[in-house]
Amino acid sequence: MELTKKAYKEILKVLNKYKNEIVFDIDNLETKAKHHLFGVELVEKYGFDLDPKRMYSTDWQELRENVFIGFWDGERRKIHWSDDGSQPNDEILLCIKYPTDAYIFGGDYPTVFFQKFFLELKTYKPKYIDSQNHSLYFSMENASKIFNAYDSIVKEYREKNKEDLKQRKIKKMKDELSKLESN
C-alpha cells in the first residue's frame, strides 16, 4: 500500500504543478486515487478478497448483491431498527441486507428456510443487527471473514433450496389434494 500511496502522491504532485497548463480533471483523479487506496486497505489491512481498482466510493458501495460497504455516523446514516438500540459512531461497516428477505429463495416466500440462512450469517458475529429489516452490520475487523465466505454460503443455500422447494411444493400439493378429497 505504501508504494501505491507514494505513486499517487508523486503523480498528483506533478499534475498539480502544471494544473493550469493541462486538461486533466485533477480533482477527479484525486478522488479515484482515494477510492483505489481504500480498496487496497480493504485487501491488505482487512483481508478482503476483492479487486481494489473496482472501488468507486468510500461512503457507500455495493460489493455484491445484498452486500454493501459504507460509512455510518449514527446520524446521517444509521441503523433503522437496531435490535439492541445501539448505533454506529463514525464507523465503516460491511452491511449484508435482505430487504425482500425470504423472496431471495423463491416466490413462495420460504420464511423458515430463509431464517436458517440468516442464522448462519449471524454466526459470523455482526457488530449490529437489524432483524426487522434483515440486515447485519460487521466491523472491519470481522468483515472479511463473512465477505470472503459469502458467495459459497449463498451457493450452498441455493442448492439446499432446490430440495427444500421441492418438499414445499409436495406439501402444498398434498394439502390441496386433501382439501379436494374432503369436499
Image: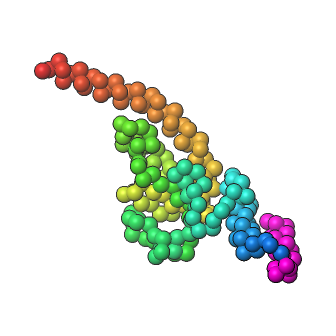
Main SS type for the magenta part? helix
Q: Is residue 74 above or below residue 83?
A: below
**Stretch of the chain drawn in magenta:** 1-21
As drawn, the residue found furthest toward the left would be 183
Q: Is residue 116 above or below residue 49?
A: above
In the rendered image, residue 155 lying in the magenta stretch gets the answer no
Question: Percent x, y for residue 27?
Answer: 72, 75
Q: Quadrant of the N terminus?
A: bottom right
Judge by depth and name the residue closer to the eye, 3 or 12. 12
Position of residue 132 in the picture relative to residue 117 (left or right): left
Residue 122 visible in the current orientation: yes
Position of residue 106 in the picture relative to residue 27 (left or right): left
Judge by depth and name the residue closer to the eye, 16 or 2. 16
Question: Percent x, y for residue 89?
Answer: 52, 75
Q: Is residue 119 above or below residue 157?
A: below
Q: Quadrant of the C terminus?
A: top left
**Total tally of numbered discs in the picture:** 0
> What is the image's colouring?
rainbow
Judge by depth and name the residue closer to the eye, 103 or 158. 103
Question: Residue visible at 31% across and 26% down?
Answer: 171
Residue 9 visible in the current orientation: no
- Quarter of the image holding residue 110? top left
Question: Residue visible at 80% across and 72% down?
Answer: 23
Question: Residue visible at 42% across and 37% down?
Answer: 106
Question: Residue visible at 75% across and 72% down?
Answer: 25
Position of residue 100 in the picture relative to residue 17 (left or right): left
Question: Percent x, y for residue 173?
Answer: 29, 24
